[in-house]
Image: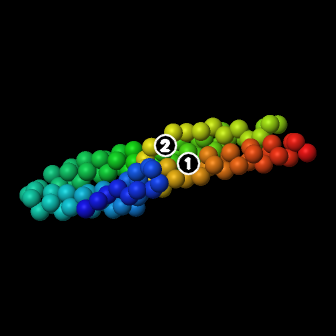
Amino acid sequence: MKRRKRRGNETMRMSVSKKLLIVFTVFAALLWLSLRLLESWIAALTVTVVLGALFYFTLCRMIVKPLQELTMSIIESRPTEHGFEYKPVKINTADELELLNDAFRRMANDLNHTGEGRNDN
């Protein structure tokens, strides 16, 4: 099973939704397994809490942190006298978040080129 797709000369890994599906499936399977194998509800609850924490930190690392970095770069960007000052951020998730970051970078460059054309007239 191939997980990588070719996009031009770049390699694109799994999408965010596939990552979430895999993490959720593994979490659900481990939860079911812990409930079936452990005799005590307290032990099963402990395993569930630990797995929930792992799920949370995995989700934060994969999706939330890059999204927060992109949001902050957009918030810190502002129009100036000479165009548009975009604070670029490096996102290497190879999924939709990286594509969104590239789109914002291109949009900022387009705004700068549009601003240069207006200033020449």
List x then y, in percent, for residue 63. Answer: 44, 50
Amino acid type assigned to the residue bearing label 1 in the image = Asn
Determine the residue positioned at 20% across, 51% down: 47
Q: Is residue 45 visible?
A: yes
Amino acid type assigned to the residue bearing label 2 in the image = Ile
Q: Name above or below for residue 85 compared with residue 35.
A: above
Between residue 67 and residue 105, name the one nearer to us.
Answer: 105
Between residue 101 and residue 7, name the one nearer to us.
Answer: 7
List x then y, in percent, for residue 51. Answer: 25, 51
| Label 2 sits on residue | 91
Left or right placement of residue 49 versus residue 68 in this view: left
Determine the residue positioned at 52% across, 53% down: 99
List x then y, in percent, for residue 116. Answer: 80, 42
Left or right placement of residue 59 versus residue 116 in this view: left
Query: Under tag 2, what secondary structure?
Result: loop
What is the number of the mark on residue 75?
none
Q: CA distance from mark 2 to mark 1?
A: 7 Å
| Label 1 sits on residue | 101
Q: Are marks 2 and 1 in contact (CB under 8 Å)?
A: yes
List x then y, in percent, for residue 100. Answer: 55, 53
Q: Quadrant of the C terminus?
A: top right
